[in-house]
Every structure is written in C-alpha cells, then in structure tokens.
Amino acid sequence: MEPIQSAAAQGRVADAPSGHWVYRALPRGLWPYAQLARWDRPIGWWLLLWPCWWSAALAAIAYARPGDALATLLPSPWHLFLFLAGAIAMRGAGCTYNDLVDEDIDAKVDRTRSRPLPSRQVTRKQAWAFLLLQALVGLVVLLQFNSFAILLGLVSLLVVAIYPFMKRITNWPQLVLGLAFSWGALMGWAAMFEDLDAPAILLYLGSILWVIGYDTIYAHQDKEDDALVGVRSTARLFGDETRSWLVWLYGGALVLFAMAFALAEAPLPAMAGLLAAGTHMARQIATLDIDDPAQCLRLFKSNSVVGWLIFAGLVAAGIWTAVKPLI
C-alpha cells in the first residue's frame, strides 16, 4: 500500500485508491503528472464523457423510423472514441488548471493537501507545461469534428476558465461545473447535425441539474474544511436540506431528459433506460448520509451507473427500431 503523499515523501493522494495501476505501472517520476490529470481517479472523465455519449446516441435515433438500417441508428464508433479521448485529455487539463488555481486552498484541506502542487512533488512551471500538453491533445481531438462543433467546443473553454474561481464568490460553484461538465450534451448532437436543436438543449439543461446533484454529494466530504478556509458550495448552502434539493435536482434532470427524448421521437427503450436511471437516483437520495464522507464518495462515483443506464437505453432504442420490422 502506497503511503499518503506529503512534501517529505512521494505516494498516493489521500482520496485515490491504493494499488491503482498508476502506482504499479508508471515510473515514480510520472506519478505527479498522473495525479494532476486524475488518472488514478477515472470517475471524473467518465462523468464528463456521459453527456457526450448520450448526445451522440440520441442524435443517432432522432426522428428514426422502423426499417432504418441499424448502422444509422447507433452512435458513430469514431465519434464515441473521439469523445472518450477528449474527455480524458480535457478532464486532465481541467483538473491540472484547477490545482494551479487552488494550490493555496488545497494546502489547507485535509483531503487535498497531498496533491502534487501543495505537497511539492511538481513545480508550477511543470504543471503549466503538462496542462498545455493535455490541451493540445484535446485540440487535436476537437479538430476531427465539423466546423460548427469545433467552434462550439472552443466556447466551452470560457466556462472552464472561470470555474475554479467560483467557489470563492458564490454558493453555486456546482452550477458552473454543471455548465462545463454537461457541454458534451451539445457536442454529440452538433457533431452529427452541425447545429443545435431543442432535444440537445434540453439534454444539456437536464445534465446541468444532474451534475449539481452529484457534485453536491461529493462536496459534503469537505464541508467542514471548506467552512474553515472560506470555500463555498451547494453542500454548505443546502446543509440538512440536501435530500430535498436532490429530489428537485434529480427529478428535474429526469423530466428534461424525458422531454429531450420525446422531442427527438426516441423509441420506447430510451425511456426504459431513463426509468432505470431514475430508480438509481432515488436510491442515492434515500441512502445518503451527508455526514459520512466515505459514503458520499461512493454515491458520487455510482453516478457512472446512471450514465451507463441512460446510454444503454438509447442504444437499445436504436437496435429496437432496426429489428422491430423483423419481428
């Protein structure tokens, strides 16, 4: 088991799992860069990826008719790969940028003081260079799309740039995170249709509510340290009313998703996937203990299951549309 990292000794960051492949496969000299990019905590890029894949899958089945070829009813494998690569690169770049902005705060919070910058495992100059390298990878990915999607992707950088500062000035930094992490809900549609229509916009709005919900759960891990150092969050704002807020946030997300599916004329299996995701969200709310940091982290991570359920429903809808005439 790797020790928790500090200025005196290299190791893993406090909230990373011990024995992760990063620490088994990479040379020690690369550990700080893997930690900056959160390669040892992949849940972040999964959560960034899901709106991209949902949007690509919804675009594929939008306005479909029985008898359409199966290949046209499934999301493009090339687009799915590009979104995966882009999510890993840009999530890493975003986290590196966040660590550069928050170095002073991270040094005061128990969960984050073992990160590479406050623990002096990497210099700020090295972190900036690594940030630029990841951003370059993201740019190469973005340039594979059509011109409308490229411009749309570039606009998202404005939101990414301001996010780390929001926790200093508003109780709603999770809203700004939602604007950034949900951008893929627009990108998948734009990559196929070269414009934005109501289904993509509703999917985006629903994803924003989902992100606020799950990141509120995540922020409950740090609420005591956050109060001491002046960091603001919806976890601190909602407090003991968090469950009630989650009912509205998750419920609103599901309604907006359903409206997006309906306007895109998505076949019925898409709604079945949404129902399964709603059941999972309800379980999160029912079992949440905001004073148990370990459980908050588990529930936060479980939102990748929500992503899989919604995506599976959309893919099943495409398959159903293709095979229904044969039954």
Image (cartoon, rainbow, N blue to C red):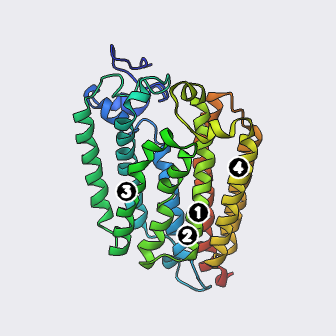
> Which part of the image, by quadrant, shows the N terminus?
top left
Residue 157's tag is 3
User: Of discs 2 and 4, which sits in the foreground?
Assistant: 2
Q: Nearer the viewer, residue 22 or 245?
A: 245
- Residue at the (66%, 59%) spot, across then down: 253
Q: Quadrant of residue 215?
A: top right
Name the residue beneath numbered marker 4.
280
Q: Of marks 3 and 2, which one's residue comes earlier in the chain?
A: 3
Q: Amino acid at mark 2?
A: Ile
Q: Position of residue 85 (x, y in %)?
A: 37, 55
Residue visible at 48% across and 67% down? Answer: 186
Instruction: Please tell me how crowded label 4 is: few (under 14), some (14-19), or many (20+) other residues with Cα within 10 Å.
Output: some
CB within 8 Å, label 2 to label 4: no
Packing grade of label 3 (10 A; few <14, some 14-19, many >=20) is: some
In the image: residue 225, left or right of residue 151 = right
Residue type marked 4: His
* First-in-chain label (1 vs 4): 1
Q: Check disc 1 and report its element: helix, strand or loop.
A: helix
Q: Are marks 2 and 1 in contact (CB under 8 Å)?
A: yes
Tell me the CA gap for discs 3 and 1: 18 Å
Q: Which mark is residue 201?
A: 2
Residue at mark 1 to residue at mark 4: CA–CA distance: 20 Å
| Number of residue marks | 4
Q: Relative to the observer, which residue lies in front, 84 or 184?
A: 184
Q: Which mark is residue 294?
A: none
Q: Is residue 143 above or below residue 249?
A: below
Q: Secondary structure at mark 3?
A: helix
> Residues under labels 3 and 2: Cα distance?
18 Å
Given this view, does label 1 or label 4 mark the residue nearer the observer? Answer: 1
When asked about the image quadrant of residue 32, the answer is top left
